[in-house]
Each structure stands twice: as structure tokens, then as C-alpha cells.
Image: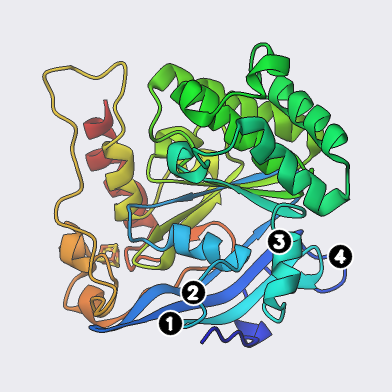
Amino acid sequence: MTTLTKPDPASAPGGSQAGGGPFLSVRDLYVRFATEDGVVKAVDGLSFDLERGQTLGIVGESGSGKSVTNLAILGLHNPRNTTITGEIMLDGQELTGATQRQLEKLRGNKMAMVFQDSLTALSPYYTVGRQIAEPFMKHTGASKREARQRAIEMLAKVGIPQPETRVDDFPHQFSGGMRQRAMIALALVCDPELLIADEPTTALDVTVQAQILDLLKDLQQETGTAIILITHDLGVIANTADDVVVMYAGRAVERGTVRDILKTPEHPYAWGLLGSIPRLSADVNVPLAPIPGSPPSLLNPPSGCPFHPRCEFTGEVGGDRCSAERPALPAGRGSACHLTAEQKQTIFTEQIKPRLR
Ligand code: SF4
């Protein structure tokens, strides 16, 4: 059963969102799934804010809790096996207490999602135009004719050539890049104020990926939509996000502006993510450096810092502190790691940066 309860406001970093607070405020979010093998702790005390017209990048490997977080915002979990605690406020409206009916009204209207796999997300049985027109009719009461016209407008807006004829095509008649554009048209048809894009470019080649990210940015400038961009790839957020939350094992482990995260990352996990981005200037004979080990089981997460089984810097902290004591994430810019600020800076400059060239 889905349960949503209010957290202690004192534990919320970044202050209260009451009375003119952030457009989206997530506070102390916990998401648990009951499975046959036990309880999966998918999200473990996550807090962040997002303002209108801004893009928040949520970055992490699969299983880090980033997609689960956004499904919780959209109210898309299976209520039979999911427990959610925490507070999610969207434009002053508390989603935590919202009924399924209220959430349904908000989805597609005030908030919308672009999924990773457009071939699965779009129905093969209906034309692209009909799939864009239907939510518009449902949420605005527009006629069929008006909704078709709106679908054509939206296809034109996302750069589909000859939208008057392509509106009657089925998804399989579109290329991968065009389908992703159509998904964006579908998500934006009711002018949502919050758009959640979950790995929107993963299945696309690099050129089309850049075009889709540019499109999202242009549309945001035009409409002022707030965007959450979920990705495993720090390269994707480089030219797109304003702020970034790095997630590991269901927790935020680092938070900062996109410049902070790309230029002066502090957390050893963020260093690992940065090291795994392909660089044009890199020597082609030097292989990419994946992060050693695998993400932990969320049925039974590691004690202390969840990254400690994969971290090469536990010795710098000393003793068993990394495996025994959970590091806290400070409010504002910062990282959840026991290394001192000086150690983080020295290690990054002397050991990590040379590996990134
Ligand atoms: Fe590594 Fe310890 Fe920092 Fe965790 S707290 S990231 S294990 S150094």
C-alpha cells in the first residue's frame, strides 16, 4: 500500500518551501518496495528543489534510485507493494496527500514525462497524431478537429517535417529521432509546468542526441517549463542542466551546479562517473575507465557509506569509518563523503584530473 507521510521539516536542507517556496520541493523522500526476497530500499532520504525554467540533472548508474524518484513524483508506483514517505510539493500543492484521481489530472497537464524508449511508450496501433491529440482533448475539452490541429502544431514545434501529413503516420513510420521528438510533442501538448525526461537520448546516436537536448532547451526557453533530466551520463547534462544531484544506492551523494559537478566534483563516485565519459581529446589507445565493482543490492545495502566497497580512497579516511559511519550530505553545494575538503581537492587535482586527459 502506498503511504505518504510528512517528514520533520527540521531535517530538510535548503529551508522550507511554504509560502512562495521552490516550484518543486522534495523532502526526505523514502521509497520502499516489498518483494518476495525482502524490502528494496530504492530511495533513501532524498531532498532537492527545482525552480521554474530551470533544469535539474539527476545522475547515477541504473539502480541508483533516480527513475524511482521521478515515478514517485508522478504517482506512478504500484500502490500494492510500494511504501512512500516524505514530502513532494509541486507549486504549493502537496502530492503526498493527493488521490490517484488528482494525480491523474496533474499528469499530462501540470507535469509530464518523456520516456527512454519511444517505441515502447508510443502505441503501435494508433497514429502519432491521435496519441498527441487524445490527452489534449481529455485535459482541455477540445474537439477532435481542434486537437488534431494542436497535434500538427506540436509536431511542427518539435521539428517534424511536413507535420500535416506525418500526423497520420504510425510510430514505426518515424525514425528513432523523430519518435523521440513526437514523444516530446506528446509530453508538451498540454503545456506542462514540469517535464521529467528519463534518459531521453540513450537509444539515439550522438548527433540526434545533441539535437534532442537542444530541442528540450529551446522549448524550455520558450515556455519556462521546469525540467528534471535523468541520466547515467554526465556528458548529457553538460550543456543542459543548471543544477545536478548525483545519486548512489538511493541517496544523493553530491549536489551542486553543473559547473561544480563537471569542474570540481568532490565525491569519489562522481569522479568515477566523470572518468567514464568518452572524450574527443583522449588517446584512442587508452580505454575508458569504468567504475570498478557493481552497484550494491538495495535489499541489503552496505553499512556506512554505501560506496565503500567500490571506493579506492577509504584508506585516506582511515580506520573503518567509511564502512561504519554514514556520511551526511550538507545543505547546498557539497558531497556525502568523510574525506576532508582539503583531501577532496588534493586527490581530485593530483590523482583524478590527470586520468581525465
Ligand atoms: Fe569513499 Fe569513504 Fe568517501 Fe565513501 S566516505 S566515498 S567510502 S572515502
Label 2, on which residue?
78
Label 1, on which residue?
81
Where is residue 323 drawn, in percent x and y?
21, 77
| Between marks 3 and 1 in the image, the one whose residue lies nearer the viewer | 1
Q: Residue at x 51, y 70 (%)?
A: 77
Where is residue 67 drawn, in percent x and y?
46, 58
| Between marks 3 and 4 in the image, the one whose residue lies nearer the viewer | 3
Label 4, on which residue?
20
* Up/down of 339 relative to 220, above or below: below
Local crowd at mark 4 within 10 Å, few (<14), some, or many (≥20)?
few
30 left or right of 93? left
- Which quarter of the rendered picture does the C terminus lie within? top left
Q: Nearer the viewer, residue 322 or 117?
A: 117
| Between marks 4 and 1 in the image, the one whose residue lies nearer the viewer | 1
Q: Amino acid at mark 2?
A: Asn
Earlier residue among tags 4 and 1:
4
Q: Residue at x 54, y 51 (%)?
A: 256
- Labels 3 and 1 touching (C-beta < 8 A): no
The image quadrant that residue 249 belongs to is bottom left
Q: Amino acid at mark 4?
A: Gly
For the residues labelled 4 and 1, the Cα–Cα distance comes to 34 Å
Q: Nearer the viewer, residue 322 or 245?
A: 245
- Labels 1 and 2 touching (C-beta < 8 A): yes
Label 3, on which residue?
24
